[in-house]
Image (cartoon, rainbow, N blue to C red):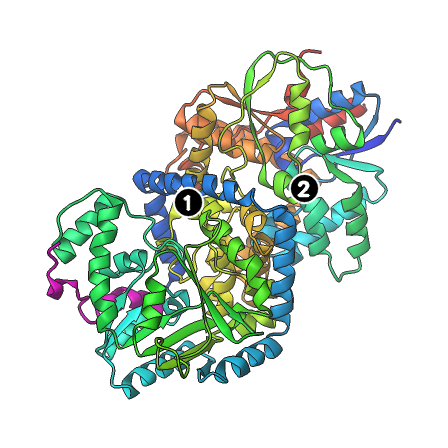
Amino acid sequence: MIMKITLFIPCFVDSFYPQTGRAMVRIFEKLGHTLDYKPQLTCCGQPPFNAGYWDESRKVAVKVLDALGDAERVVIASGSCGAMLKVFYNELFKDTLREADARALGEKTFEFSDFLVNELGVTDIGAKFPHAVTWHDGCHGLRELGIKTEPRALLSNVEGLELREMGEAATCCGFGGLFSAKFPSISVAMGQVKTKSAVETDTKYIVSNDGSCLMHIQGVLDRERRGMKCLHLAEVLNQGW
Amino acid sequence: MAIAPEKIEVPAGSGAAHDDNFHNPPEKPSAQFHHDADEKTADLRHRDLIQSALGKYYVARAGKQSKFQNWGAARQAAAEVKWEAVGHLDKYLREFEDKISARGTKVFWASTEEEARDYIVGVIKDAGARRIIKSKTMTGEEIHLNAALEKEGFEVAESDLGEYIVQLREEAPYHFVFPAMHLSRGEISDLFKEKLGTAATDSPEELTMIAREVMREKYIAADVGISGGNFAIAETGMISITENEGNARLSVSLPKIHIAIMGIEKVLPKMSDLALFLPMLATAGAGQALTGYNTLLGGPKQPGEIDGPEEFHVVLLDNGRTKLLADPEQRDALSCIRCGACLNVCPIFKNVGGHTYGTTYQGPIGSVITPHFKEMQTWKHLSSASSLCGACTETCPVKIDLAHHLLQNRRNAAQQKPVWSEKWAMKGFAWFMNQPRLYRLALKLAPLAQAFHPLVKGRRLDPLYVWTAGREFPKVKRETFKDFWAKREK
């Protein structure tokens, strides 16, 4: 079945990691689906939400509700922004006139790997990536959305790829949005726990389904001169075809 | 083993010096938190010590958890029992009081920590008692009982090994289940050598024996035993105490007076509920199938019984709990059985350590409840000091939605009294993000600005200093996704 997929591209993907978005476009086109994107959308509203300023968050989030109201399926390349739309909008818009809209949006919104595996039933994109990689579970994807097996299933079908799990795969990397700026020493210490565990796998790449975590992890890796590179799952699935 | 008794005694008031930090928190607990967090995260030895101690806990816990037929169903059942109990505290606490009073126990309802302290001090004074043996009670820590007792000139000894160690060090418990987990064997040996004059040893057995020798004397000499309580059983009017060292049994059965202090949320409706809660507490808390000693206490010595205290007092403490009960969003936080599992999995706790929190209850549960028990604005920073990773919610045996409660605290704090700089920053952020053209223009200019970034990067002048002090900042791409999409649409 051909679906009309509306991409939600988080601000950090748009600005820092557009290749993740381009990879998603190429993958969904390969699978034969039609794509849509709302260029007026910039942010899901998570920073003010997490800071406790829900009125300000709603000002941004309501634009998302408006723009995506008629979308068939919304796919996001981030567990964190995905959780914002799927889980936290319900809390943000609780007891407001947009409560039902928020619920409806949550029901048709999916994180990228979840959408591929559980909605499209696809676990093999036909990608080739002849490298050993390790995996980082983004917390919001893992614990708010319950996504754990899906990305692993997708990676297991990438030709030549060997997944070496790290001990701290499910431990928070320490990004946490504003937390990383409010408590930088704790955030960096948590990042170091993550990079140390990743280095122990003796791989060159850390792959995840959340670019916001990867932004932080890459920052710590580069400062430590670890020589490892972070890749979004979509970038890996985009290789070799 | 030669132990000079005069050296064992904790000088009166010495514990109070540190404890006062908690009783009269420093002007700015948030500034203290930031300061201590910076210090502890830079202490790699501390980080390694905690990581390795907890590594053993994870293995033990996973093993014991797998002995439950269905851990998920057990959590659900436990959450439901606690929900029922917390939702009907009026009924179950009265039932508990009626049943336990019928056997001669005096129940005192303390609304505040002052009332609880005054009552306990009064009981001890009325009895003309002087020496007190305590078994581990976090509720006692919460009301700063030791400082109050020492101020009255009573001699107070902690009988739980971990508590005894931190008492000797004149510091607060590091973790509400493992009070001395931040110390290596060598440090404990040094402490005993310094305070007790014992020989250095690396053997845990020998260290335990040193403390045991000291304790035996204390049990026999004590006039009053003070304990906490893990559960209060309404149906039978009993309190349940869980421990691994046998010290609580001795503390409450040898002295003539036993005073137990517990939060009002500790009540369980039925005796049979313990069949679930005892193994659950042991598993989640310490990775044990069952804690070493589980004791049920139903009153003072009854006619015909040969041992037990002559007087038994139970202090039921509110101290902010009913404020939490009045909050429909967060009242499930009263379901907490103080197992400490949320601390053990918390990456913040593991990096900053227990003392940094400056609270009786550390970790996620402490960050959730402290603003309710004390005051929101003074303690809201703890709710912000979280990446919201949700490991706490995932592990909690009674299914408290801790991560979401941290978010709710942040919202409530901002609604109650916004930090204006934050509020305006967020207003500006929301405004900016709703101007797609301005947003695109800013991203077009960003690569240019970033070309000059190396001049200030990582220095105080750097506008991104909070990020770049410890990490590299990513580069804005010349072609954003929006640019790519615009081209594609043409």
Say few, some or many: other residues with alpha carbon within 10 Å of mark 2 (under 14 / 14 to 19 / 20 or more): some
The x and y percentages for residue A150 are: 68, 30
Quarter occupied by residue B197: bottom left
Q: Is residue B154 above or below residue B217?
A: below
Question: What residue does disc 2 label?
Answer: A145
Q: CA distance from mark 2 to mark 1?
A: 25 Å
Tell me the chain of label 2. A
Q: Is residue A53 above or below residue B44?
A: below
**Nearer-the-camera pick, B254 or A42:** B254
Q: Assign the N terminus of chain A to one quadrant of the image.
A: top right
SS state under label 2 = loop
Q: What residue is drawn where x is 61% and y is 73%?
A: B326
**Residue range corresponding to the magenta coloring:** B1-23
Q: Is residue B334 left or right of residue B349?
A: right
Q: Is residue A1 left or right of residue B56?
A: right
SS state under label 1 = helix
Which amino acid, by three-letter code, is at mark 1?
Lys
The x and y percentages for residue B290 are: 47, 53
**Nearer-the-camera pick, B436 or B51:** B51
Question: What residue does disc 1 label?
Answer: B350
Q: Main secondary structure of the magenta part?
A: helix
Which amino acid, by three-letter code, is at mark 2?
Leu
Which label was assigned to residue A99? none
Q: Is residue B317 above or below residue B66?
A: below
The x and y percentages for residue B446 are: 56, 32
